[in-house]
């Protein structure tokens, strides 16, 4: 999802610490600026809802606990982010509770890629998440019907006609790419 700098004066006066205390809805703190996430398309919203539903249903059915969120704020080493979909393990829920902003990246994150997103930016964002506590990131490309699963040790590509599987978090979860992307 493309994020753009906020045009108001708040952008220059707003710090990461301010964002962590009170992150305005629909914003991220990136490269020293408060940025607004662009509006999502219907397709983006549908896929985001599908991911939330499937991950939440799986963790509930299997008794794994934890919680699934959409657009929940977290802090990476240098930025404030809002992943499209994120899973927080029971262990981290016990450690942190439910703070206004998670002080690290979520263990499992999905970012739904817009046609205007640059591949280099999304790869860099996945690395940023990995360096800040994430164990697994899903980069979902709706137009190409690809899902790239990134962990510290591997990068896997799942395409239309295949079944995407978690690699490090929510062990045992899988869903057909075509079902997820609808």
Image (cartoon, rainbow, N blue to C red):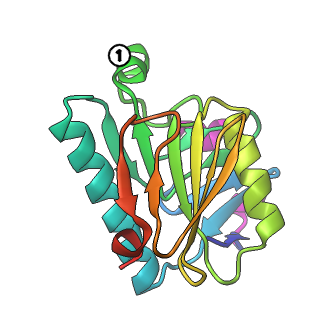
Residue drawn at x 59%, y 33% as measured from the top left: 135
From the image, give the main secondary structure of the stretch colored magenta: helix
Q: Is residue 11 magenta?
A: yes
Q: Position of residue 160 (x, y in %)?
A: 50, 76
Classify residue 98 as left or right of residue 62. right
Residue 117 versus residue 59 in the image, above or below: below
Residue farthest toward the left in the current orientation of the protein: 61
The residue that disc 1 covers is 94
Quarter where residue 4 is shown? bottom right
The answer to which of 173 and 126 lies nearer the viewer is 173
The answer, for residue 22, to whether it is visible in the render is no
Classify residue 36 as left or right of residue 123. left
Quarter where residue 173 is shown? top left
The answer to which of 103 and 14 lies nearer the viewer is 103
Residue farthest toward the front in the current orientation of the protein: 161
Residue 116 versus residue 9 in the image, above or below: below
What span is colored magenta in the figure? 8-21
Residue drawn at x 52%, y 33% as measured from the top left: 168
Residue 100 versus residue 148 in the image, above or below: above
Quadrant of the snapshot with the N terminus: bottom right
SS class, disc 1: helix
Quadrant of the snapshot with the C terminus: bottom left
The answer, for residue 107, to whether it is visible in the render is yes
Q: Is residue 24 magenta?
A: no
Quarter where residue 52 is shown? bottom left
Mark 1: few/some/many CA within 10 Å (<14, 14-19, 20+): few
Q: Position of residue 134 (x, y in %)?
A: 60, 35
- Image label count: 1
Q: Position of residue 92 (x, y in %)?
A: 43, 21
The answer to which of 110 and 24 lies nearer the viewer is 110
Q: Position of residue 130 (x, y in %)?
A: 69, 37
Residue drawn at x 20%, y 34% as measured from the top left: 62
């Amino acid at each position: 999802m493309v994020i753009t700098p906020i045009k108001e004066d708040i952008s220059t006066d707003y710090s990461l610490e301010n964002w962590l205390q009170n992150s305005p809805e629909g914003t991220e703190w990136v490269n020293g600026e408060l940025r607004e996430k662009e509006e999502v398309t219907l397709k983006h919203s549908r896929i985001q809802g599908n991911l939330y539903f499937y991950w939440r249903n799986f963790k509930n059915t299997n008794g794994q606990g934890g919680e699934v969120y959409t657009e929940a704020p977290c802090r990476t080493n240098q930025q404030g982010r809002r992943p499209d979909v994120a899973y927080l393990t029971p262990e981290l829920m016990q450690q942190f509770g439910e703070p206004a902003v998670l002080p690290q990246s979520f263990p499992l994150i999905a970012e739904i890629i817009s046609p205007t997103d640059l591949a280099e930016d999304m790869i860099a964002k996945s690395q940023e998440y990995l360096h800040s506590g994430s164990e697994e990131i899903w980069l979902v490309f709706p137009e190409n019907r690809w899902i790239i699963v990134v962990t510290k040790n591997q990068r896997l590509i799942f395409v239309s006609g295949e079944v995407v599987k978690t690699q490090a978090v929510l062990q045992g979860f899988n869903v057909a790419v075509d079902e997820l992307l609808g």
